[in-house]
Amino acid sequence: METEFIYWRHHTLPGIKVEEICGGDDKPSGVWLEMAYQVYSENGKEAYREIGHFHNGAPFLSGENCRISISHAGRFLVVATLPATPEVDLSEFSERAAMGVDAEASDRAQVLRVRDRFLAEKELEIIPAGDVFMNVLAWTCKEALYKAAFGDGLDMRKEIEIVTLPKIGPAVPVYDKEEFDPIRTGEGVVTVAGNKIKFVLYSYESEGRIVTLAFSPKCAKFG
């Protein structure tokens, strides 16, 4: 039986637009991803959207000057978007447009086997070795920070640091102030060109995946 794709667009509590695509479970993985991108492209607010990539692999929307970040985990695609920042060269790192997203299945136990490759010693001490959920959360934090910092070549263990893990927020927020209290967010630090840059981490669960946003406190946000 053929299953339909599901497209969902929403604003998260940090003020970052997130678009999710799932469904289509009967499609082979490679075909699924191509079709999911097509669904995304056809659901632009005003017109068809095309995704391109800079020399460093970072994605962008053709003809637009807003930062986007993309992640997919199985039959789940997520695209996060910031407001337009015409004052910023999107092909270069800028705290004004520093944002990354990552998604991973919350029960992906394989992450336990590689945790010592992406977690530093002090991170290994605070994240339980046998806790799949917490290790997947940490993985999404590291990946989101990597993307936010344009991290080509950065060492996950030495140059990307999780200071505090975020608590999982709701996929559909009710916009209660407590849902975005600083207690719920996490903090990360990435060394970019020799400078330590602070990032905010925000995570929620959707369709059995942990979705994490990493963004600079200085980046553009939707109201």
Image (cartoon, rainbow, N blue to C red):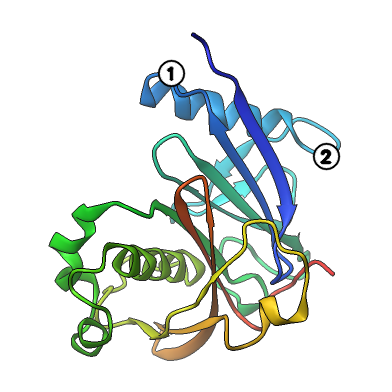
Q: Amino acid at mark 1?
A: Lys
- In the displayed structure image, the side of residue 106 where residue 3 appears, left or right: right
Quick one: which residue is furthest to the top in this view? 1
Residue in the foreground of this view, choosing between 128 and 96:
128
Disc 2 from disc 1: Cα separation: 26 Å
Q: Residues within 10 Å of mark 2 (few under 14, many from 20)?
A: few
Q: Residues within 10 Å of mark 1 (few under 14, many from 20)?
A: some
Indicate the secondary structure of the residue bearing disc 2: loop
Sequence-wise first label, 2 or 1:
1
In the rendered image, which quarter is residue 220 located in?
Answer: bottom right
Q: Is residue 38 above or below residue 213?
A: above
Q: Quadrant of the C terminus?
A: bottom right
Q: Amino acid at mark 2?
A: Lys
The residue tagged 2 is 45
Task: Give residue 102's position: percent from left, percent from top.
Answer: 46, 57
At a point 24% along the width and 76% down the height, the residue shown is 119
Residue in the foreground of this view, choosing between 170 and 66:
170
The residue tagged 1 is 27
- In the displayed structure image, the side of residue 8 where residue 154 appears, left or right: left
At a point 39% along the width and 38% down the height, the residue shown is 74
Q: Nearer the viewer, mark 2 or mark 1?
A: 1
At a point 27% along the width and 86% down the height, the residue shown is 126
Residue in the foreground of this view, choosing between 142 and 55:
142
Task: Give residue 90's position: percent from left, percent from top.
Answer: 63, 62
- In the displayed structure image, the side of residue 207 where residue 45 appears, left or right: right
At a point 31% along the width and 72% down the height, the residue shown is 154
Query: Count of labels shown?
Result: 2
Task: Give residue 135's position: percent from left, percent from top.
Answer: 29, 68
